Amino acid sequence: EDSPTICHLTVKRYKRAGIDLVPLAKASDAYSLEARLGEAWHMRSRPIVVIFDENVYSLNDTLDVVPETGTNLRTRLLKHPLFARLVDEGKLIFASCSASEVNDPNVVCKLGKAMSPAEQIRNLWSAVTSR
């Protein structure tokens, strides 16, 4: 999410629905996405759902903040053998929650930002279980 405030409010909304989210709200979070997801996988070994906003910020090689897209982040993840395998096995699932149009076949579900967490969860569950 490109807005830390929106990200943290979303985390609170999901927590009230009984679901823990790990916020990725800073450019450094997007930059270290592989490490964060790898750690989450090795600690829990349960399926991981990553909900992307399409317009985010990351860091470049000189650690300057730069605009990034969720599509580029997903592409970057799919180049990593572990994450490519997890996607193939249905253990790493990509969803989108963006006002921008996302045309990525790897995104299993598009969640509206105006939807309640319960609606988002139902839509996501339906998309995941119908695969």
Image (cartoon, rainbow, N blue to C red):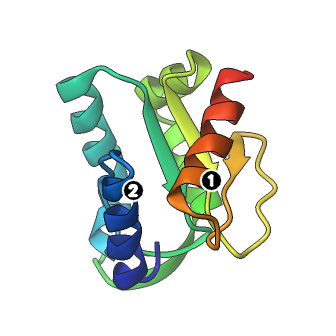
**Residues at marks 1 and 2, CA–CA distance in whole angstroms:** 11 Å
Residue at the spot 62% in from the left edge and 68% down from the top edge: 54
Nearer to me, 58 or 99: 99
Q: Quadrant of residue 70?
A: bottom right
The percent position of residue 119, horizontal first and vertical second, equals: 62, 53
Residue 25 position in % (x across, y down): 34, 72
Residue at x 63%, y 65% (from the top left corner): 115
Regarding mark 1 in the picture, which secondary structure is present there?
A: helix
Q: Nearer the viewer, residue 6 or 13?
A: 13
Identify the residue shown where x is 18% and y is 27%: 43
Q: Position of residue 89 (x, y in %)?
A: 56, 15
Residue drawn at 60 percent across, 53 percent down: 120
Work out whether 39 lies above or below 95: above
Image vertical order of residue 37 relative to residue 89, above or below: below
Check disc 1: other Cα within 10 Å, few if <14, some if 14-19, many if 20+: few
The disc labelled 2 sits on which kind of residue?
Tyr
Checking the image for residue 63, the label placed there is: none
Crowding at label 2, few (<14), some or many (≥20) Cα neighbours within 10 Å?
some
User: Quick one: quadrant of the C terminus?
Assistant: top right
Q: How many marks?
A: 2
Extreme residue in the top direction: 89
The amino acid type found where label 1 is placed reads: Glu
Residue tagged by mark 2?
14
Determine if residue 60 is in view. no
> In the rendering, which numbered label is found on residue 119?
1
Q: Give left or right: position of 101 versus 78.
A: right
Would residue 45 be seen by someone viewing this image from the given angle?
A: yes
Q: Residue 34, image x and y in percent?
A: 35, 45
Q: Nearer the viewer, residue 90 or 80?
A: 90
- Relative to 33, residue 23 above or below: below
| Left or right for 33, reference 118 | left
